[in-house]
Image (cartoon, coloured by chain):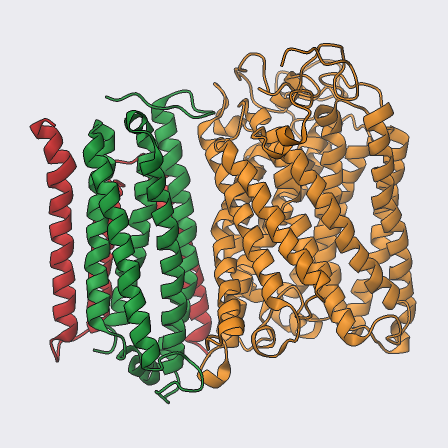
Amino acid sequence: MTREERHHVLVKPLRIFAALMALLTLTILYAFVPGLPFKTEAGLGIALAKALLIALLFMQLKGASGIVRIAAVAGLVWAGFLYVLTFADLLTR
Amino acid sequence: MTDTALQKPWADAERQRVATQFGVWMFLATETLFFGGIFLFYTVSRIENSAGFMAGARHTDVWFGSINTVVLLTSSLTMAIAERAVRIGAVPLARAMYFATIALGLCFVTVKGFEYWKDVSEHLLPGRDFPIAQTGASEFWAFYWTVTVVHAIHLTIGLGIVARMLLIPRDQLAARWTTAEGTALYWHLVDVVWVFLYPLLYLAGR
Amino acid sequence: MTETPEAGLLAREPGERNYLTDGTTVRSWLLTTDHKRIALLYAAGITFFFFLGGAAATLIRAELVTPKGDLLSADTYNRVFTLHGVIMVWFFLVPSIPTTLGNFLLPLMIGADEVAYPKLNLFSWYLWLSGGLLTLFALLAGGVDTGWTFYTPFSTLYSNSHVLLAAAGVFVAGFSSIATGINFLATIHLLRAKGMTWMRLPLFAWSMYTTSLVMVLATPVLAMALLLVFAERAFGMPIFDPRSGGDPILFQHLFWFYSHPAVYIMVLPAMGVVSEVIACEARRRVFGYEFMVYAMLMIALIGFMVWGHHMFVSGQSPFASLVFSALSFVIAVPSAIKVFNWTGTLYRGQIRFSTPMLYALGFVGLFTLGGLTGLFLASLPVDVELTDTYFVTAHFHYIMVGGSVSAFFAGLHFWWPKITGRMYSETMGKFAAVSMFFGFNFTFFPQFILGYMGMPRRYHEYPPEFQPWQVMSSTGAVVLAFAYLWPLFYLTWSLVKGPRADDNPHDATGLEWQTSSPPPTGNFNTPPVVTEAPYGYHPQGFAPHSAAPTEQAQTP
């Protein structure tokens, strides 16, 4: 393997993995240290950060063609319709 | 740049690559909506029966959950390396990483098995012997059992899909790099679902 | 294999090879990856399920001839209308046009030689079949009594019927829908012929695109709704059970998030077929092509935001009901645009009242009536009165049967020569089309009146004052049944004895007509190149009744 290949195949994924492990540590600490505010939001926010790292970098959405990115986002947007309108009901009963 | 094994009806490699990515991401969009449905149940239940739901959530074992999160994130690493290795034709590295991914996947399932055994021994199955009386606690555990089983089924299917990569003869593996990309996308989804499940199941109510 | 096929049933001349002659073993059919053969595999399946669902309908109409419940017990009646709904929705209407006409025609229309994922296509048929077998098994084991809507907590806690089997059957069939949708989306994005730009696509191709969007994005939520029912019923998981803090209305949100867009899965393909048939048989470009496209896209999008109109009396909040009602009014607009544009296409046309055209015109009228009655139901106060009455039943049958089934028959007849290489008897076809129109109206128009008068749906007994309308409806159903059975006869006859079809017997535009009837396995002998807009039935600015083509564009 050339040096450049090694960087692309091994070093980059390892760096992303390190970031993921750091985020995991952060989320556990935040959940268990007593008295910290907005624990749910923090937990989900960190999960979102991890998911974005995986999606954009491991799954290579950053650099994918337009229709592929739209396909990736479509599920989230449509799930959004489900949530928004269901909560329009639930929260106003 | 390696050759590509072209499948019908694709006439060139770049089109086949986009087709593979597009098809798999469309499928992953359906998975987003599928899991989105049961996450909606979690959200509704947690809002409607907040105290009981969180009381139920505190009975999950954060050690099992965290170990499994590390296992699955590591398997995403090995999968990412495997996919990139196939692309540059580093076949022995790719195969080693596929074996590692499968091993980590099996590790996840094993840890889950032990966790289920512990949960059952604490009677955390909704029903007659369920120990927490507050309304909402059993709904949490209904979510837990249903979603972790569905996730585990997805993971097991993923193990099969990864094993398929190992069945490709070594001299043809590099040419099948678009298949490797598709396989990796599915595996990473299994990980992303868990990434969201982890705080919902193990960090709630702490 | 080097034998020269004879000009037997399948080919026009000795030695001609087409997709039917290439491989005549059972294996070559069951393991085919040719989209045209897969279309026929699906056609065989949906025909079977159509008549099975029709048998259930026959029992329903027979029971309703008399006010007393004398033919079927209440419980059996519940199982019969459930079977009718489950089979007709998931095993006939949802697959019908997309998996038969869509599979066959889409690659041809865009100038491709295959769909994007041919093996996935075959797998989708086996998935669909497996779902169908599970559902059949549920029927043979005694059926389901929950209605096709599987509402909780009845389905999960109290029903004594084979809910799990039926839910499993629908669950599995759902994956077939998703697979077909993904296949068509990729095919249209990535396999269009040179020169086939998006705004040159035939409207049927656009209808397959929008339908596929809906199939892919709606079906997974149904899958989860059914999975949760399974978890609660089979494993005692408290999900919708109110005694454990669950919300039964959550099931309805999840269920209707799919099932409302599902009706657009059932109508968008029909709209695509009707556009093709009307343009050809009136010899006119489609009026307002771009708006026809935008209308279908809007229907597909907004269709996901109106599902709560099925839940106005369920306990849903008045605020949410208001939002859903408003959006349901909005979604009428694109459909209306399409009806205006079909009418605009007919204007100054040289109309041929052929069999497909009769079915297509029937669609326009019946869809309009069904759609207008939808507005009654979208209006909150009116819906509170009409919900769960026969008015609703009549409304959706006008669209799904008067609309989609008519369009399916239109398409079946229009493309029959292309698919089979044979012509059917026009006289017999016209007779069936007219019978269907009259039979349909006699069956379902009285149901609007019954609903308005207060007759509840899903009841096998009723007060005697409703009987005249019920008898009219059941009589109409006899004519309708004939209209469905008659084509079985003359279409089958045409396969054996019908005259051979030319490549383009209707003189239609469209790439599918530029290849032989039936097409070769690879679709085109040379890959087509597209240089013009679709529906080139007359020059721009041409008014058929004037002496010569004008320089200016036509003004109304």
Count of numbered circles in the view: 0
Whether A89 is drawn above or below B172: the answer is below
| Residue B201 in the image, given as x and y percentages of width and height | 29, 70
Q: Residue at x 58, y 16 (%)?
A: C524
Front-lying residue, A72 or C37: C37
Q: Which chain is green?
A: B
Q: Is residue C330 visible?
A: no
Front-lying residue, C306 or A46: A46
Q: Residue at x 51, y 29 (%)?
A: C199
| Residue C348 in the image, given as x and y percentages of width and height | 75, 28
| Residue C411 in the image, given as x and y percentages of width and height | 71, 35
Q: Residue at x 59, y 42 (%)?
A: C125
Residue farthest to the left, as pictured: A3
Judge left or right: residue B104 versus residue C191.
Answer: left
Q: Residue at x 78, y 39 (%)?
A: C359
Quadrant for the N terminus of chain B in the image: top left
Whether C143 is drawn above or below B21: the answer is below
